[in-house]
């Protein structure tokens, strides 16, 4: 049974992260979710707790904190970090190593040997933006593995590449990383 830390950013695709958490849990993994503050405004952390049976976290300093240094405890706990969905803003913060929220701080505190996967979800124009492409490239240079977004109809009405990969595809990528 592997320990998977699921980082969830603010995106309409957040509902797929709930499905992913459920699928990974059903596959026998322990899954703990860390939501950005904005993600927690879209979906309650309690939903992740319900599908995983594990506590979900959003704020290192708020009332839901687990201990004095949640970012260190979560980083030590994780055997793999998967960030899905990763918005353009979250990708930028992770690429630059900014630690302004619990999820980004956990990513910074993660031991070097722990695999990191990122699954972007955003409007096709945002995904094609040179800054976003540069930030994703930087993450790959830093050792992150990319679960490519898919083509299709977007919540904003646009068509194109930017849909969050299906939970089964992300779960398969996590399984491949865990197999080594």
Image: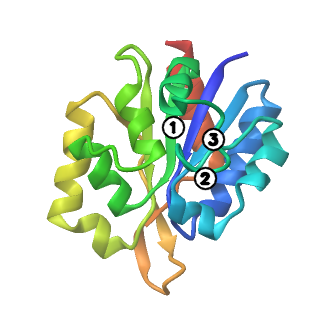
- Please state which of residues 172 and 92 is positioned toward the viewer in this rendering: 92
Residue for point 69% across, 32% down: 31
10 Å crowding of disc 1: few (<14), some (14-19), many (20+): many
Q: Position of residue 178 (x, y in %)?
A: 56, 18
Give the CA distance from mark 3 to mark 2: 30 Å
Q: What element carries label 2?
A: loop
The residue indicated by pointer 2 is 166
Question: How is the structure coloured here?
Answer: rainbow
Instruction: Say above or below: 35 vs 112.
Output: below
Side of 53 where 58 appears, left or right: left
Specify which label sits upstream in the sequence, 3 or 1: 3
- Relative height, residue 147 to residue 71 (above, below): below
Which callout, 3 or 1, points to the residue nearer the camera? 3
- Per the image, the residue denoted by label 3 is 65
Q: Which of 100 and 12 is in front in this view?
A: 100
Query: Which mark is first along the chain, 2 or 3?
Result: 3
Q: Name the residue under label 1.
A: 82
The location of residue 30, given as percent across then percent down, is: 73, 26
Residue shown at the point (30%, 71%) measured from the top left? 126
């Amino acid at each position: 049974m592997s320990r998977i830390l699921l980082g969830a950013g603010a995106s309409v695709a957040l509902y797929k992260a709930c499905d992913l958490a459920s699928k990974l849990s059903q596959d026998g993994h322990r899954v703990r979710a860390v939501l950005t503050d904005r993600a927690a405004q879209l979906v309650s952390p309690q939903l992740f707790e319900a599908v995983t049976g594990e506590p979900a976290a959003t704020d290192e300093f708020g009332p839901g904190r687990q201990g004095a240094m949640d970012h260190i405890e979560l980083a030590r706990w994780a055997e793999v970090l998967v960030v899905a969905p990763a918005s353009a803003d979250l990708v930028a913060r992770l690429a630059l190593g900014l630690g302004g929220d619990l999820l980004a701080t956990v990513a910074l505190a993660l031991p070097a040997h722990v695999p990191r996967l990122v699954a972007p979800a955003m409007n096709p124009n945002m995904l094609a933006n040179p800054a976003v492409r540069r930030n994703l490239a930087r993450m790959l240079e830093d050792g992150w593995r990319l679960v490519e977004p898919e083509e299709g109809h977007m919540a904003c009405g646009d068509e194109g590449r930017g849909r969050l990969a299906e939970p089964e595809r992300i779960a398969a990528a996590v399984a491949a990383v865990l197999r080594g």
